Image: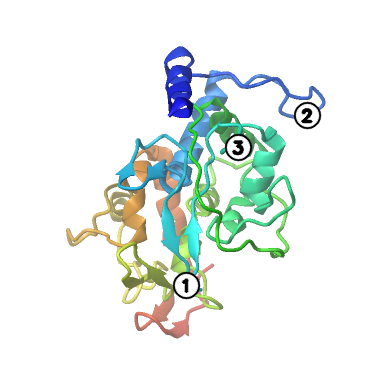
């Protein structure tokens, strides 16, 4: 109990916006600005950090922006995945990690000890994160109140991971589909909407639900009949922000967990994301199996 009391004192006394001093040779040596922290908070939210790593203890889920982890999920292998503590607690979180080490975990799935994170952490998509956004996220995580939360280790750890291309450079805000592609990577849309060895975004992947059920991810390519090609950009924006389909029915499954986070998408980002989704090559499916991949579009 004394540890939780200390955490409460830290919250009341600090509400920290500064980080510990680090090696001045590191590229993140300068103290974060309010603008960087605000950007880090935004990217962490739309990327799902605050959703997946929300502090969870038996019988209780704490606030949206506490990062103590603890939520459990069942992987396709049947193994249990436990979201780790990514709060600034030095003992049970990532408070002792350097910003560069947090960035490496986010973009390459590699812990400071060299262990590979499980693929439930979508680092295959996060590897596209720019330096500016990655270090903003690291600054944001390090600025948050520490949460002491001990949990069981995951059943296993991956030893080898895929070769990852380098992060991309600057994002051109005037290139709406290009910027939208970047946002889709941060929001790891392809992680759920792409079946193993299947065309990107054509759906068909089986996703396990918390209650033990399953749902098949839908096709979100621009095919008008089996995808969402008939949806307008405004309808795509509404679906992402409000979890409501054009026919008024709610979006269910894992995506619904992101409702509070994706509602925060800025107008410019929401339009860019919708423009990118509308530009996806149409793939015709029967709900799970690919019938035809149409190559007439980029």
Pair 3/2: label in front: 3
> Which residue lies at the image location 55% right of the left edge and 50% below the top edge?
182
- For residue 132, what is the image quadrant? top right
Query: Does residue 96 appear left or right of residue 122 in this picture?
Result: right
User: The N terminus is located in which quarter?
Assistant: top left
Q: Earlier in the sequence, mark 3 or mark 2?
A: 2
Q: Position of residue 36 (x, y in %)?
A: 57, 26
Q: Secondary structure at mark 3?
A: loop
- Please state which of residues 189 and 160 is positioned toward the viewer in this rendering: 160
Q: Position of residue 23 (x, y in %)?
A: 78, 24
Q: Secondary structure at mark 2?
A: loop
- For residue 285, what is the image quadrant? bottom left
Res. 112 in view: yes
- How dense is the environment of label 1, judged by Cα within 10 Å: few (below 14), some, or many (20 and up)? few
Query: Does residue 245 appear left or right of residue 204 in this picture?
Result: left
> Which residue lies at the image location 34% right of the left edge and 62% below the top edge?
210
- Please state which of residues 126 and 22 is positioned toward the viewer in this rendering: 22
Residue 94, labelled with which disc?
Answer: 3
> Which residue lies at the image location 71% right of the left edge and 37% below the top edge?
100
> How many angstroms separate mark 1 from mark 3 (CA)?
27 Å
Res. 169 in view: no
Q: Position of residue 227 (x, y in %)?
A: 36, 71
Q: Which residue is mark 1?
A: 78
Residue 26, labelled with which disc?
Answer: 2
């Amino acid at each position: 109990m004394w540890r939780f009391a200390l955490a409460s004192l830290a919250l009341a006394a600090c509400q920290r916006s500064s980080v510990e001093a680090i090696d001045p040779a590191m590229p993140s040596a300068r103290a974060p600005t309010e603008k960087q922290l605000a950007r880090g908070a935004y990217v962490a939210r739309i990327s799902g950090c605050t959703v997946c790593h929300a502090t969870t203890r038996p019988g209780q889920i704490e606030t949206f922006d506490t990062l103590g982890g603890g939520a459990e999920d069942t992987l396709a292998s049947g193994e249990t995945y436990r979201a780790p503590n990514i709060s600034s607690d030095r003992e049970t979180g990532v408070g002792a990690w350097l910003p560069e080490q947090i960035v490496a975990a986010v973009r390459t799935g590699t812990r400071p000890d060299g262990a590979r994170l499980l693929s439930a952490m979508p680092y295959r998509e996060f590897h596209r994160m720019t330096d500016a956004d990655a270090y903003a996220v690291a600054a944001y995580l390090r600025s948050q109140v520490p949460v002491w939360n001990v949990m069981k280790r995951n059943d296993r750890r991956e030893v080898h991971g895929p070769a990852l291309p380098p992060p991309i450079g600057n994002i051109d805000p005037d290139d709406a589909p290009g910027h939208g592609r970047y946002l889709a990577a941060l929001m790891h849309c392809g992680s759920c909407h792409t079946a193993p060895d299947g065309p990107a975004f054509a759906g068909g992947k089986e996703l396990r639900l918390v209650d033990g059920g399953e749902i098949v991810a839908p096709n979100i390519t621009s095919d008008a009949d089996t995808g969402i090609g008939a949806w307008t950009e405004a309808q795509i924006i509404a679906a992402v922000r409000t979890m409501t389909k054009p026919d008024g029915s709610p979006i269910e499954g894992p995506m619904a967990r992101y409702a509070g986070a994706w509602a925060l998408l800025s107008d410019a980002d929401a339009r860019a994301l919708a423009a990118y989704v509308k530009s996806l090559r149409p793939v015709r499916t029967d709900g799970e199996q690919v019938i035809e991949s149409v190559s007439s579009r980029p």
